[in-house]
Amino acid sequence: MTKPFTLQPLVNLAQQRNEAATKRLGQLNQQQQTAQDKLDALLLYRKDYQTKFQEAVKNGIEPAELRNFQEFIYRLDEAITQQRQVTSYAERSVQHGREDLMNAQVKMKSFDTLAQRHIEEGKRLEAKLEQKVQDEHAGRQAAYQKPHPEGE
């Protein structure tokens, strides 16, 4: 019987950290996609509004309406700038999440390798012990079956 792997708690911890890093990366990917979707929507809205503004200018526009269009486009540009920052931050977070996951996977694989070596060493020792027992048994059998000189 092999002795327990003394590093098993660390193997379990590495597996938990790997699972947590995987889950966290999924959340970060989702946040990044949401941020990108919002940015895309703002860019599309700005493009549509710019087209409406150009049509209004072609058809003639009052100065007050012109200021309203310009002010709204300015506010859209500010929102787009802010959303680009959010998207950029989310992309960096995803990259950090990937790195964390890769580190967790490396650690987990290292501990798994150690655990596998422990199992293999245990099997090797068991096989060696079993061979020794068989050799001893065979030796006793051979000694038992050997004719004993009588009367000497």
Image: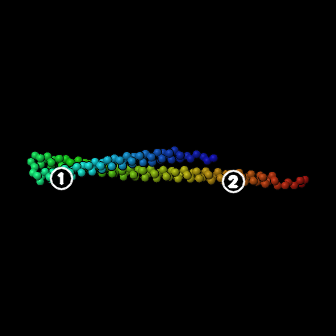
As shown in the figure, which amino acid type bears the numbered disc 2? Gln
Q: Residues within 10 Å of mark 2 (few under 14, many from 20)?
A: few
Q: Secondary structure at mark 2?
A: helix
Whole-percent x, y for residue 67 in the image = 12, 47
Which is nearer the eye, 84 or 42? 42
**Figure colour scheme:** rainbow
Which is nearer the eye, 21 or 32? 32
- Residue position for label 1: 51
Whole-percent x, y for residue 66 in the image = 12, 48
Furthest residue in direction right, as rendered = 151
- Seen at 29% across and 49% down, the residue is 37
The Cα atoms of the two marked residues, 2 and 1, are separated by 87 Å
| Mark linked to residue 103 | none
- Seen at 76% across and 54% down, the residue is 139
Which is nearer the eye, 45 or 151? 45
Residue 77 visible (yes or no): no
Quarter occupied by the C terminus: bottom right
- Seen at 17% across and 47% down, the residue is 72
Residue 54 visible (yes or no): yes
Q: In this figure, what is the number of numbered marks?
A: 2
Give the side of residue 7 with respect to residue 77, left or right.
right
As shown in the figure, which amino acid type bears the numbered disc 1? Thr
Label located before the other in sequence (2 or 1)? 1
- Residue position for label 2: 131
Q: Secondary structure at mark 1?
A: helix
Whole-percent x, y for residue 73 in the image = 18, 49
Name the front one of labels 2 and 1: 1
- Seen at 47% across and 47% down, the residue is 14
